[in-house]
Amino acid sequence: MNIITYSESDTVLEGTKLGAKLRPGAIVALYGPLGAGKTTFTRGIAKGLGVDMSVSSPTFTIVNEYPGIIPLFHFDMYRLEREDELFDIGWDDYQDRDGVCVVEWSENVPGAFPAGTITVDIEALDDTTRQLDIVFPDGDI
């Protein structure tokens, strides 16, 4: 699915639509360069999951947890040097906690994702316009 957004609020809205469709155990792998809008899109996913908190990038903490109708586990792999570091922080445990895992900088941990992971490539076309390429490996949800 290819979507063009024309503002930050459009990007949040598309994330909200996706978040409303997700079920516990879903994993969303986000790809895109710095400033592409990964955290903005995640804010929308959080909203769609019923999270009523401000969502920020977990760059320095690696993972932020947000309670909601379905909990959100928001990972940022930017600072990881090795894929094993993800497993050292309990990646497997998070997948079993009946929440949704959203991972920024997924390109840094390519072997960490199980079958069925939803991928979202985000590209900044200009200061406000984004192209979102969403792939549902098990078909549209």
Image: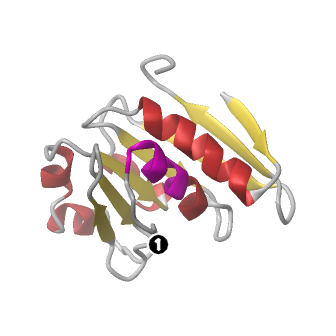
Residue at the image position 51 percent from the left and 51 percent from the top: 30
Q: Position of residue 3 (x, y in %)?
A: 73, 36
Report the span colored magenta.
42-50
Q: Amino acid at mark 1?
A: Ser
Q: Which residue occupies the extreme right position in the image?
A: 126
Which residue matches tag 1? 57
Q: Nearer the viewer, residue 8 or 111?
A: 8
> Which x, y percent locates residue 4?
78, 41
Query: Within 10 angstroms of label 1, few (less than 14), some, or many (20 or more) residues?
Result: some
Residue 114, by quadrant, is: top left
- Whole-percent x, y for residue 36 in the image: 68, 62
Q: Taking 78 as reference, is 100 left or right?
A: left
- As drawn, 24 above or below 111: above
Which is the main secondary structure of the residues drawn in magenta?
Answer: helix
Display colour scheme: secondary structure
Residue 19 vs residue 26: left or right?
right
* Quadrant housing residue 99: top left
| Relative depth, front residue between 69 and 108 | 69
Residue at image point 67% right, 50% down: 11
Q: Is residue 56 left or right of residue 68?
A: right
Q: Secondary structure at mark 1?
A: loop
Tell me the residue at 26%/36% (across/down).
24
The outermost residue toward the top is 139
Residue 135 lies, with reference to residue 105, above or below; the image says above
Q: Position of residue 98 (x, y in %)?
A: 18, 41
Quadrant including the N terminus: top right
Is 70 magenta? The answer is no
Q: Residue furthest bottom?
A: 60
